[in-house]
Structure formats: C-alpha cells, structure tokens
Amino acid sequence: MAKTLDFWFDYSCPFAYLGSTQVGALAKRMGAELTYRPMLLGGVFRALGTPQRLFETLVPPKAQHNARDMQRWAALYGVPLEMPPGHPMRTVEALRATLVTGCDPRVIDGFYRAYWVEGRGPSEPDTMKGVLRAAGHDADRVLARIGEQAVKDDLRTRTDEAVALGIFGAPSYVVDGGKMFWGQDRAHFVAGVPIDDVLPPKPAPSGKKHTLELYWDFSSPFAYLGSTQAEAIAARTGATLVWRPMLLGGLFKQVGQPMVPMQTWSPARQRYLFDDLNRWAEHWGVPFKFPSSFPTNSLKSMRCYLALPEARRDAYRERTFRAYWAEDKDITNDSVLRDLIGEGADGVFARAQSPEVKKALVDGTERAAKAGAFGAPAWVIDEKDLYWGQDRTALVERALMV
C-alpha cells in the first residue's frame, strides 16, 4: 500500500479543481498521507516551453469538446463548475497565501470555489481576505507575509521540484515520492484499482436504445486501446455499435490539427505518454507494444478494410490493430497486409484502389469532421454527443445507460 500521496496543483486549472474535490477520498481509500503541493503552472509551462495560454492553441472542435468534458466530469462528481469569463486569472498571490497557511485544505477549497464556482479572481485582495477569514485565519497577518522573499522562494522552489519530477500539467499525483500520474481522470491508476471503483456508481439502465458510433484509424494507439473495449461497452449497455473508419491524417488536415500531435508535446509529456499507454493496456488486460515504425501511413490498410466484405471486416480490423500495436508489424507492407487479409488478398488489393472505396474513406473522414471529431477514438452517441479518447469509456458507458 502507498504511504504518501502528493497532490500538485494550481488554482488556474479546472481539472485540478475537479481533482481537488476527490483527492481526500482517494487518499483515504489508499490509506496514504495526503500532502498538498502548490506550484505555479505558468512556471512549469515556461520551463518546458509550453504556451502560457495553452487552451488558446487548441483547434476549435477540441476546445469545444474540452469545455463539455469539464462539465461532464463535474456532473459525474456532483460538483459545480463555471468557466469564469476572465480565465486564466492570476493565482500567484493566492498560492503564496496558501503556503503561508501551511496548505490548509480549507483555504485550498476556498480558493478553488472562488475561482471555479464564483468566478472571482483568487489573487484579488477581497477574495483572499474572504477565503482566509472563512477558513479561520488572520487574513491581515497572512497577506502581510505573501510578499516576503522566503515565501516567494518557496513557491519557486516547489515549481522547480515539480518540473524535476516530470510534471507538465495539473493536477499531478505523486505516489511515495516516485510514480507520477497526470489528470484527475487517472485516479484509478493512482489507487491501483479498476476505474469504476473510484467513480460514483453507474446509473440503473433506463432501457433506452442508443447508437454508439466509433470513429477510428489503425494509426492511433488510443484508437487501438479503445477498440478493445467497444464491443463490451455495447453489450453491457445494449447500444448498437457502428464502426466508422476514417483517415486520421485527413481529419487532422480538415480541422487544422498537427499531423502527429504528440510530437508537439514537451519531452516530459512524451515520456509520460508511454507509461500511460502501457497502464491502460495492463488495466484492460490487452497486449501493447509501441511500434518501431511510428507514425505510419494507414491509407492502404484502411482502404483494405473497406474493400473487404462486411462479414470479414471485424476480424481484419482486430488482427490489424493487434499486428501494429502489439506485434510491431509494418502494416504498410503488402506481405503483412496479405497475411492479415487472408483469402482473396489480391482481389481486396484491387478493390482497395477502386473509386468507390477511395470515396468511402474520404466520406467517412468528412463525416467524422462534421460530427466534431478531431482525433481518435471519437465516440458519438445518437449522432450528437461526442467523447474523445480511450480514457473516456467510463463516461461513454454511463451516458449510454440513461
């Protein structure tokens, strides 16, 4: 069992706010001593070369999805959340005040409530006085100290420590001073339990029949991992599952996304990605090995999928996903594709070059863009509600039950 759980945060992150509402119960479940670790997120970004206003770099469909995603998590946790019109607001003085109080959880909750529920700047003098007094502190004494060099240095040192730990965003959890996990949606990894164990209970099935469309491409590790869970989700919820092949590179061009988004991330975040992918694979009990040839051109393998008779597509899709993401096979190679296709490969290759198949893949990509997709996997419920990522399956399943 873990002995310590460090919660690294800044008040400017909505997901850190969401995580703060759950971290006490998480530490209790783990039997771990909880320590709050303030850091200046802007300082972390500066050290890693990350844009200070990161949300402004998002393509429009991703920004829209993230806004919905925050509200979905808030609803799941049963907590209020409102995006303040002045976001991002200055937090440095509030973080210093937090340090002066010894990181009092009541103060932390107060500053988060001020920012993400009441829309007030946490570093505004009136806000700080109100939060500190409500938590039982002498506000004037605390505020008199936030300008001291020792307090300033303390926040700076903690921020440097976060960078040294490999932290690149908030919230971040560090277990026993070693393993780092990013995001309030990774609480199950922090605790080492199934994801449903750290979430509110699933609702009782309503009996309503839903359609679940899954937009995917062989080139995405997240699409592979999500694909391994799709059939089970549909079976548990009674949803009709529809597989929607698309060309991810074509989608990226349409929405203005970098062709290989992970290559634009900081080195710290890229290193973390490999650990995260392996954790998801282990969590679901599926094989995974990051391929030696990445990124890959999935155009031919995707066209072959569409060129196959429908009755053979599921088996080919599963074999090809596994070949690339678990067996390190080159799915651009004709001999590899021939083995994956099996009987009648020459005919499939020929049909894959037909105008009908080429158009079907283009149409599927355009359909994904119109649905609001910007990456894979993209889950769309009843042709209206889009969820992005293999890490949103718990939200998808709950939405299919109501």
Image (cartoon, helix red, strand yellow):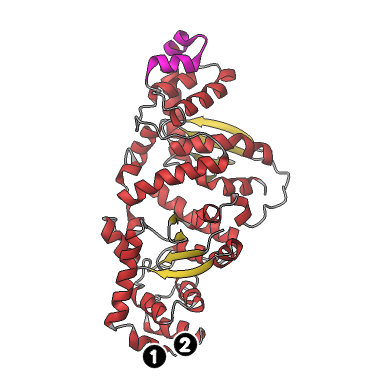
Please name the residue that numbered disc 2 is placed on: 137
Q: Secondary structure at mark 2?
A: loop
Q: Position of residue 48 (x, y in %)?
A: 28, 56
Q: Is residue 199 left or right of residue 321?
A: right
**Vertical relation: 208 (above or below) 21:** above
| Residue 57's disc number | none
Per the rendering, the mark at residue 141 is 1
Range of magenta residues = 333-350
Left or right of 345? Residue 161 is left
CB under 8 Å between callouts 1 and 2? yes
Q: Quadrant of residue 262?
A: top left
Residue shown at the point (36%, 70%) measured from the top left: 89
Instruction: Let me know if residue 346 is in the magenta part.
Output: yes
Whether residue 372 is visible, yes or no, is: no
Label 1 neighbour load within 10 Å: few <14, some 14-19, many 20+: few
Give the spatial CA distance, label 1 vs label 2.
8 Å
Q: Residue at x 39, y 82 (%)?
A: 100
Residue 245 appears anywhere in the view:
yes
Is disc 1 placed on a helix, strand or loop? Answer: helix
**x and y, in percent, of residue 202 in the image:** 67, 52
Amino acid type of the residue that numbered disc 2 sits on in the rendered structure: His
Q: Main secondary structure of the magenta part?
A: helix
Mark 2: few, some, or many residues within 10 Å (few <14, many ≥20)?
Answer: some
